[in-house]
Amino acid sequence: MIIGIKGMRYFLVLFILAGLSVKNIAQDIDYERIVKYVNQTPNSVVNSTFKLSNYLTLPFNTDIEKLASIYYWVAKNIRYDDKLAKNPKLYIETKEVVDDVMKSKSGVCQHYAVLFAELSRLAGLKAYVVEGYTMDKGKIADVSHAWNLVNVSGDWSFVDATWANAIIKSKTKKGFPQTYFMVKPEENIKTHMPFDPIWQILSSPIKYDEFDAGKFNLVSGNFSYNDSIGEYLMMSSIGQYRATIGRMQNNGTFNKLIKKEFEIKQKNLSTSLSNEEILKYNKGIVYYNIGMNFLNQYIKLKNNKFKDKKYGKSALMAIIDSSSVNLQKAESNFAEIQINDPEIKRQIKTNTTNINKSKTMIVKEQEYIKQFFQVIRK
């Protein structure tokens, strides 16, 4: 179950480096040591993500051991909240998710994934929250899911602390739940389908309908997910929404979960575009107010017949020029805005009219200043 988070993004620094494969490194991990250490986590650190991340990673030398420690703690100590799964909570930002799960020590898949990513980030590790849906024993889940993607020495692997929690809770296996730790892309895709195919980490992404039918072949392709991810992470939120929407549209038939997520992405894009237009409007208003303030300052000085000796010709011209420059910037901002809000459109029209009147006035006043000081010199 994915809890809605407005504008949720975890930035992942991409490293494409030569190194040992994660699979070989994982085989050499002393999981018993990790379990024993994590089980001794003191209460004094469990209410602070910074303290907890530091404790869980302090004695380990490799990134994969640190990830294993974080993964095991999250999987074991966060209780799955069935009631929350049935009645999802909407969060405004990621920090609220982290605060909630740290306080209650419970949550749904989004809480597991976000907390894992946050504890990893604080330890200088590279983790990303992936949203999608899953298949278990040939059946597509009724709700969406969230898990993690990690990068160790340029190698990508997946982590699912939520599913690991189910193993620990069932007590069918003792010790460290290796099944969902550092899962390679070609294995992960057998049960986990990201909404955005870029996060499959496959050179030939699997189509949604192929995954749903459980009939697909893993073949080598020419899709460069490393380059695509690098480009994606450099985009604005609007660019990311557009890129994701485009990839989803080209990845086969939508089931109900994909359709719902696609609609959310479209809504988020629309909201982001509106917010960007509002930012342009607010920026235009700032320029407009500055320009009008300079103009009003000049008018006040003129009404006083320029008796204030601090303001000679150069100073007055500077004031009137500053008004002109800022009003021009405001006009440019207003001209670029594309928004349907009737009140904002009305205000832009009013301000633009005032700017045009002020520009005409400024031209006349620039000439007036020149003539005024010519008369004084005579």
Image (tube, rainbow, N blue to C red):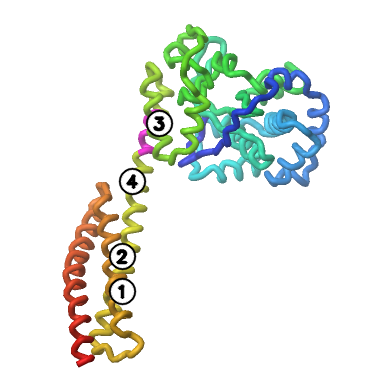
Residue on which the image places disc 1: 294
- State which tag comes first along the sequence, 1 or 3: 3
What's the residue at 33%, 46% (across, down)?
274
- State which tag comes first along the sequence, 1 or 4: 4
- State which tag comes first along the sequence, 3 or 2: 3
Residue on which the image places disc 4: 274
Callout 3: few (<14), some (14-19), or many (20+) C-alpha neighbours within 10 Å?
Answer: some
Residue on which the image places disc 3: 243
Q: Is residue 264 magenta?
A: yes
Secondary element type, mark 3: helix
- State which tag comes first along the sequence, 1 or 2: 1
What's the residue at 52%, 26% (across, down)?
226
Question: In this picture, is 211 found above or below 322?
Answer: above
Position of residue 6 in the picture relative to residue 55 (left or right): left
C-alpha separation, residue under disc 3 versus residue under disc 4: 18 Å
What's the residue at 23%, 62% (across, down)?
351
